[in-house]
Image (cartoon, rainbow, N blue to C red):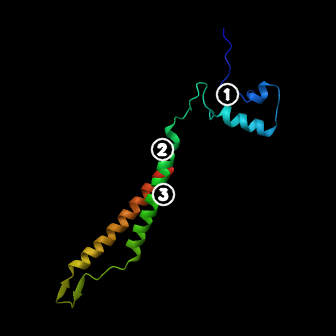
Amino acid sequence: MPAHEPTCSCGRGPSVAQGKRYGVRSYLHLFYEDCTGASPGRDGSSPHGAWAPLVCKVSLSTGTLFLLVGAAALAAGSLAPPKLEGIGEEEFVVLDVQAVRYNHALGTCRLVGMALCAAAGLLGAV
């Protein structure tokens, strides 16, 4: 039977194979590269693929952008004062259509801001 070398052993590596041990640095080096699979495989390819760092950076950047835009929209919708929609006395009330549109736009700003902040949270978790 061919001798099968274990894939995760903290007793192998360049410094241990030559009979030299360098203490804690050697142990941590071997643990993080050999035991977690963080080092490139035997064929030279990375175990996680080449796209993983790019996907991580893009999702983090997009999440940050969504958070900033969402916070700005939420602040604009919450801090701007609403306008009075009905003007007049008890018997004669005039509905201000522009004020209704303005108040609806403020509500939409708050809704979009909350949605963007939630999307930013999801992208940050990914």
Q: Say which residue label 3 marks.
A: 64
Q: Amino acid at mark 2?
A: Val
Marks 3,2: beta carbons within 8 A: no
Query: Which mark is first along the chain, 2 or 3?
Result: 2
Q: What's the residue at 78%, 28% (across, down)?
A: 16
Task: From the viewer's perspective, tell me whether residue 92 is left or right of residue 114.
Answer: left
- Location of residue 56 in the rendering, given as x and y in whole percent from the top left corner: 51, 46
CA separation in Å, label 1 and label 2: 27 Å
- SS under mark 1: loop
Query: Which mark is first along the chain, 2 or 1?
Result: 1
Task: From the viewer's perspective, tell me whether residue 102 is left or right of residue 121.
Answer: left
Q: Say which residue label 2 marks.
A: 55
Asked which quadrant contains residue 46, the reply is: top right
Q: Amino acid at mark 1?
A: Cys
Q: What's the residue at 67%, 34% (across, down)?
A: 33
Q: Residue reaching furthest top? A: 1
Circle 1 Cα neighbour tier, 10 Å, few/some/many (<14 / 14–19 / ≥20): some
- Location of residue 26 in the rendering, given as x and y in whole percent from the top left corner: 77, 36
- SS under mark 3: helix
Task: From the viewer's perspective, tell me whether residue 26 is left or right of residue 34.
Answer: right
Task: From the viewer's perspective, tell me whether residue 79 is left or right of residue 45.
Answer: left
Q: Amino acid at mark 3?
A: Thr
- SS under mark 2: helix
In the depicted structure, whether residue 64 falls above or below residue 36: below
In the depicted structure, whether residue 27 falls above or below residue 91: above
Circle 2 Cα neighbour tier, 10 Å, few/some/many (<14 / 14–19 / ≥20): few
